[in-house]
Amino acid sequence: MKRTAQVSFVSAVLIFAVLSISGCQEQGLTDQAKQTRLLNAENIRLQHELEKCQEQIEQQKVSGKSIDDVVTMMFEANTQANKQMIEENKNLRAQVEALKQNIEELQNQPEQSKE
């Protein structure tokens, strides 16, 4: 419930910023005023993200994991994801090469049948 309320609040702030900017245009306010309102909305969004991160860190502390443990786990997960992406990239490149060869063969077939 708390998470839904936070997301709704952030959404409301961003919608308010957009509506405020529309109001700025109607009122003829400067570009600086528009930019300020956008930056304020972004600041609120970033503060919300920071709070979420701090909550997650606190949850990890409660579960007995240190920040170093969390960083190590994140590094390992990143390394594993990178390896998977490299492998997927290799597979996709091999598929592309096979498709290129198939296309070349198909393009050469009509020429052979004409002869």
Image: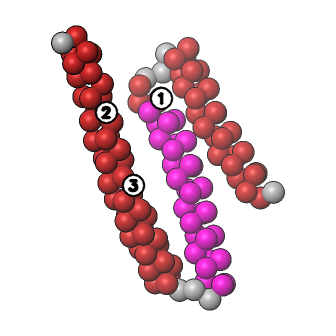
For the residue pair 42 and 32, the one nearer the viewer reads as 42
User: Which quadrant of the figure has residue 102?
Assistant: top left
Q: Is residue 71 visible?
A: no
Question: Callout 3: 10 Å neighbours few (<14), some, many (20+)?
Answer: few
Q: What secondary structure is found at the residue carrying circle 3? A: helix
> Which quadrant is home to the N terminus?
bottom right
Q: Which residue reaches farthest left?
A: 115
Residue farthest right in this picture: 1
Look at label 2 and name its amino acid: Asn
Disc 1 is placed on an element classified as helix
Alpha carbon separation for disc pair 2 and 1: 55 Å
Give the residues in magenta: 35-63
Report the residue marked by disc 2. 102
Mark 1 or mark 3: name the one nearer the start of the chain.
1
Q: Nearer the viewer, mark 3 or mark 2?
A: 2
- Magenta: predominant secondary structure element? helix
Cα gap from disc 3 to disc 2, whole angstroms = 21 Å
Q: Indicate the amino acid at tag 3.
A: Glu
Q: What residue is pinned by disc 3?
A: 88
Position of residue 74 in the picture relative to residue 6 (left or right): left
Rendered image: mark on residue 13: none
Tell me: residue 68, above or below residue 97: below
Q: Is residue 9 magenta?
A: no
Labelled disc at residue 34: 1
Most extreme residue toward the bottom is 64
**Is 3 placed above or below 83 here?**
above
